Amino acid sequence: MNQILSTNDKKGSSVLGLKPIIKFFAIILVVMAFVFAGQGGYKLYKSMKYKNEFPRAELKTEQFGDVLNLKFSDEKVLSKIEYSWNDGNVTEIKNIAKTNVDIDIAVPPGENILNVTAIDVEDNKTKFEKIKVSYTENDIIYERDRKEPTISIEKSATAKKFIITVKDNKELDYISYNWEGEEPTVVKATEDTKLEIIEEIAAQKGTKTITVKAVDKAGNESTKSRTIIGSEGPKIKAGVKDDNIIVKVTSENEITRIVYTHNEVEHEVENIPQGSKEFEFSVQLQDGENKLKINAYEDEIMTEYKCKRTK
């Protein structure tokens, strides 16, 4: 009997001892379930909030007449761009797969509102503020005009001068040029010179830099400078000695080439020493009248000399 009672007490004690432990773990599990559920809900809320209210992409716009350039950038790869004018149909540009996107879209006439949305590969959407864009048919001259005018500064074939040539693909507004330390000279384009302006300028003596600036009607601008060694060009003298015409050429810098025509036959003087500032040669007189034309060069600067001699 005592053994039976003893055995029953042990069993009862074992069952009663487990109940508090089970309750404790049950409470822990319930608490953890609430914690994990709360964290999961927070993550979902945070993700949805970021997706809808915190866009990352950036947009810069620039208008060229009836063309609007859109430049997008994002930390993540963009997958699609959507845009619409006013309340019209949405146009989609898909399969972008870039973090930086540059697109051009046509601008309708009048004043319009552009709606733009950028979507990345994780489906995050950036809906930009409405963009007001205006365009009239009078702006057609600047359509797609992003090209700067071109400038060339070349020495003239005649002594003491060089030529400035400025060209534009649409319409020039003006050009200006000035020697270092001097005020610019401005030349406005006219109806006849709206595509090309040519100016022939006298070189200044010595070594000086000239700067040319060109601006077109769309506001595109270009600048070019060149250092010019100014000179009056070679000097030529001719005289007769015995049966020859003696020609003497001198230069402040260097004689680079001499060409002469004797009675319609052209000749080029050979073997002019490099760096020569003085050179002399002779032309044999023919019976009767001798017509002589001499072109002496100092780089591109040329001096022309003509004379007649009779034998």
Image (cartoon, rainbow, N blue to C red):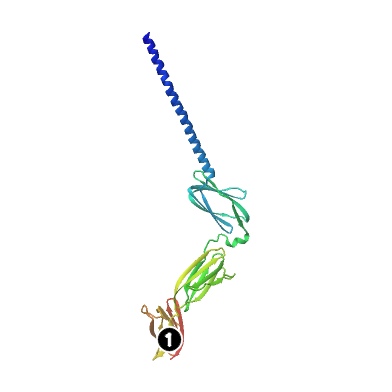
Q: Is residue 162 above or below residue 28?
A: below
| Residue 3 locus on image (x, y percent) | 36, 10
Q: Furthest residue to the right?
A: 110
Number of residues whose C-alpha sits closer than 10 Å to that of mark 1, classed few (under 14), some (14–19) or many (20 or more): some
Q: Is residue 252 left or right of residue 140?
A: left
Q: Position of residue 52 (x, y in %)?
A: 54, 43
Return the residue nearer the eye: 281 or 220. 220
Q: Quadrant of residue 288?
A: bottom left
Image quadrant in which the N terminus is located: top left
127, above or below 160, in the image: above
**Residue 223 seen in the current view:** yes
- Residue at 43%, 86% (x, y): give it: 237
Q: Quadrant of residue 254?
A: bottom left
In the displayed structure, 224 sits above or below 270; it is above
How far from the left and from the top, in percent, is residue 53?
Answer: 54, 44
Q: Which structural element holds mark 1? A: strand
Q: What amino acid type should be assigned to the residue bearing mark 1? A: Lys
Foreground: 280 or 20?
20
The residue beneath circle 1 is 237
Compared with 109, 296 (above or below) is below
Towards the viewer: 264 or 47: 47
Residue under the image location 40 percent in, 17 percent down: 13
Residue 289 visible, this orientation = no
Please indicate whether residue 299 sits to the left or right of residue 188 in the image.
Answer: left
How many numbered discs sit on the rendered protein?
Answer: 1
**In which quadrant of the rendered image does the C terminus lie?**
bottom left
Toward the top, the furthest residue is 1
